[in-house]
Amino acid sequence: MRRSWLNTLLAGTVMMALSIFALGDQAWAAEKKDDKAVLDEVLDILKEKGQISEEKYQELKTRAKKEGAGKVLAGFEGWTPYIKSVDGQHKIEFHGRIHFDLRAYEEGSRNLDGNRSNVSSTRSDLLTNFRLRRARLGVDATFFKYLDFKLEGDFGEQGSSFILTDGYGELNYWPELRVRGGQFKVPFSFEELTSSRFIDFVERSMVNNLVPARDVGFMLHGRLIDGMVEYAVGMFNGTGQNNFETNDSKDYAGRLLVRPFKLVNLPPLQQFHIAGHFTHGDQDVHPGPAAGTSLQGRTDGRFVFFPRVPTRGDRTRYGVEAVYAYGPLGLYGEYVRTEEERNLGPGGSNLGDLIGQGWYVAGTFFVTGEDKAHGKAPKVKRNFDPRTGGLGALELVARYAQLDFASDGSLPSPGANRADALTIGFNWYLSPNVRVMFNWVQNWFENDNMTPIRGEDTSWELFSRLALWF
């Protein structure tokens, strides 16, 4: 029954996509003012003012189209190199980012042992180290104005290996209804959907352990009522980035964002939004009897305080967020809850669902007076330049997060499985495309057997980053 229902859904989706492309063929013939080339707009203005006749208008447009055919322009928009056609129909942009990090731990910090505890004296150390956290190169392309493509890969922590991050195509003619297919981020969580170029902290919070990242699938999304409402619905493999599908089931995801004061002339409230999101899917491994594994709990520094446990069955995620910015101030927070079934086998061995839940609240403030815009680089008033006295932009940041795992059934490590983390630090923007980041994190653990330092229920971690992007 489920397979039949899924086949019907897939068939309907394909028909919808084909109808959208068919409508798009007609729609592209109707040119929109916002998408016109500069020369077209000039000719329109001359015609409206009666400076040229309709006959001359059509003649000049035809000549301009012939002269521009096949010609390209190249240059930079800010730091971003591009190639585009003269008529504005096609454009290719080249992007990249480098994140060079230092990660340090309190003396004596070690990973858990093979028995999921900190008892063994032979545990591996958490080593202070430098790392190339991200080294990404990508291409964003637009063809015929309304067909977008993105291809990006990472050479960072994977060493010499190339790891695909994003690879998708999108039809973007209607802001109200866009169609995307390929590998990209599942529409879930403000923190995850914010690019690593613009996250306020070196690492996303512990709550991000519960959140889906990239997956292969398709999505319908858009903006309504002049951006007051945004929505996204999609279907994904459910196996994550660059992983093969393991069963016939798919994950379903949805997100709804509302800016209630978007259309109200109250600047202090216009950047406020609330959003809710969910995913649901069957995580049974197919074929064979092998079970899957649960989500895990780990700190910003990747100390795993709750290792994965076997699961089989449905996994449901849902969460809410609230985000605000005005002037130099930014505030936001999220709550996420996950439920994972543990139908592990015959003989009454099924266990209670594994429940994961977490929340965080965060605040930022530009002491140099720049305006906060979430998901964007600030407009730095004075780039760093000792010769002219430019100091760049300085932003103070703070966050408190909590992550907890529990189950009605037994867990391999008895006792509480909660961790809390306080992060404080700063972002120093030398320019809109270069920043230095520093974070100090204090962690508290409830389970004495699952801590980095035996006999201590706290530990600290320290991070710094030099980030550049174009």
Image (cartoon, rainbow, N blue to C red):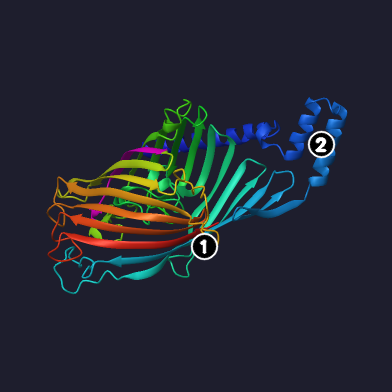
Q: Which residues are magenta?
A: 309-325
Nearer the viewer's eye, disc 1 or disc 2? 1
Q: Is residue 5 magenta?
A: no
Viewer-proximal residue among 457 and 152: 457
Amino acid at circle 1: Pro
Camera sees residue 250: no
| Occupied quadrant, residue 301 | bottom left
Q: Is residue 315 magenta?
A: yes
Q: Of the numbered discs in the image, which one, if any, rests on residue 239?
A: none
Q: Point out residue 410 in the picture as x, y percentages from the top left corner.
A: 13, 51
Secondary element at image label 2: helix
The main secondary structure of the magenta stretch is strand
How far apart marks 1 and 2 lie (CA) works out to: 50 Å
Q: Which residue is mark 2?
A: 61
Viewer-proximal residue among 345 and 391: 391
Would residue 327 appear left or right of 71 to someone viewing this image?
left
Label 2, residues with CA under 10 Å away: few <14, some 14-19, many ≥20? some
Q: Which residue is mark 1?
A: 386
Viewer-proximal residue among 46 and 160: 46
Q: Point out residue 164 in the picture as x, y percentages from the top left corner.
A: 49, 58
Quadrant in which the C terminus appears: bottom right
Indicate which disc, 1 or 2, sits on the residue closer to the N terminus: 2
Give the residue displayed 18% in from the left and 50% down from the top.
346
Amino acid at circle 2: Lys
Secondary element at image label 1: loop
Q: Point out residue 140 in the picture as x, y percentages from the top left corner.
A: 58, 51
Give the residue displayed 27% in from the left and 48% down from the top.
400
Give the residue displayed 28% in from the left and 62% down from the top.
461
